[in-house]
Image (spheres, helix red, strand yellow):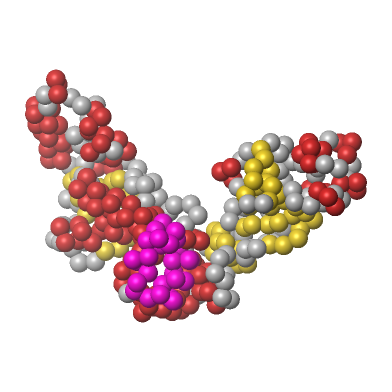
Amino acid sequence: MGHGSTRRLAHCLACRKVILNRFHKGHVQFFSCGCVEAHHIFNFGDAANQNVVAGVEVDSSHVVFIFKRLHDVNLGSGELSDKDFFPVQQTLRIFSYDNSFDGLLCAFAAADGEGLERCGFQVGVGGRPRLWPPTPVPVHAQTAAQFLERLRQAGGEGTVQHVMYVFLAEVKDTEQPLYEFARLTLRAGRNVLGMRTNAAVRRVVDWKAKVGKEAHRVTGLLRFMELQDGTLYARFEPDHNVLPFVTPHFQRRFPRENWVIHDLRRGLAVAWDGQTLHPVVGVPDNVDALLSQREIAFQDLWREYVQSLAVPERRNPALQRRFMPRRYWKHLVERPD
């Protein structure tokens, strides 16, 4: 049976689309279902023996399947089902953790302890069913602290800072590059941050820069409002979890004031009482109703001042968005119309 018949029968195991595209890589002929962003790539390399090898990359696990001999498949149905496949090999080990920083470090320690250069990570044990279930990694504070100290000894405080920033970036699929970065640090030491030709290092450095940029931007855009009890309250909705990086700035900026900074997107809040910083649980939803009369008067005065300075003929919304992205306007007293 030739390639033409195989192409008409084969469907992508991941998305169920019929194989559409054909391309070459070296001397091997590949077929694709068109889901390039999902990497559902099929390699039909053994048509002479009526076997078809298919590579399917789902999430971060790369599983290789092989069709049964085509004469054993029910050709009358016009397509192949899961029962027409059987696994040949799995090239990546998957570790699951509890989405905490300590949990991630424990997963890294487990993978590094097995000497794995590449592996997959996922939060929890749920998600898409897999032929090989992920390995749950229990959280031990001592294991996490020991692995973090190994990174600090090998790469310095800057390396540890990169790991923390990328974790708090809350970007999808950061675990694998971060693990490669950590593993490289343990072997290359302080030189790792200069290895920008390495894809994992480059991505970690870029993510850290994005988080740092937003944290710096927030320190200038955060607006505090005085409540009736004299507490200063500020709210924001950042893309990344920058609250831990923002609070030290305001501890130095307002050391004698009582203030609360509230991340609405994540439901996190911290309070400073002039001496200690502590988390806040149960911030009221109707904070605007708790504003002091002096705060309301100053907000009206500030809006009037900004409006009086504005020149309608020179209004440039595109330039406004360039200097201050629209996502930050919501919580500004002087927000543009």
User: Residue at horizontal 79%, vertical 56%?
Assistant: 86
Q: Is residue 233 above or below residue 244?
A: above
What is the tally of numbered marks visible in this picture? 0
Q: Residue furthest front?
A: 27
Horizontal and vertical percent position of residue 333 = 20, 36
Left or right: 180 as drawn, with respect to 306: right
Which residue is drawn at the image coordinates 29% and 38% (left, top)? 325
Quadrant of the frame with the C terminus: top left
Image location (x, y in percent) of residue 242: 32, 55
Quarter of the image with the N terminus is top right
* Residue at the image position 28 percent from the left and 42 percent from the top: 287
Q: Is residue 190 magenta?
A: yes
Vertical placement of residue 1 versus 148, above or below = above
Q: Is residue 247 left or right of residue 298?
A: right
On the question of residue 302 being in view, the answer is yes
Pick whichever, 258 or 23, lies toward us.
Answer: 23
Secondary structure, magenta segment, majority class: helix
The answer to whether residue 245 is magenta is no
Coordinates of residue 93 in the picture (x, y in percent): 62, 65
Location of residue 195 in the rendering, given as x and y in whole percent from the top left corner? 37, 65
Q: Residue at x 31, y 60 (%)?
A: 244
- Answer above or below: position of 258 versus 303: below
Which range of residues does the magenta coloring cover?
178-204
Q: Nearer the viewer, residue 271 or 129?
A: 129
Q: In the figure, is residue 118 to the left or right of 217?
A: right
| Observer able to see residue 67 | no
- In the drawing, does residue 87 fall left or right of residue 249? right
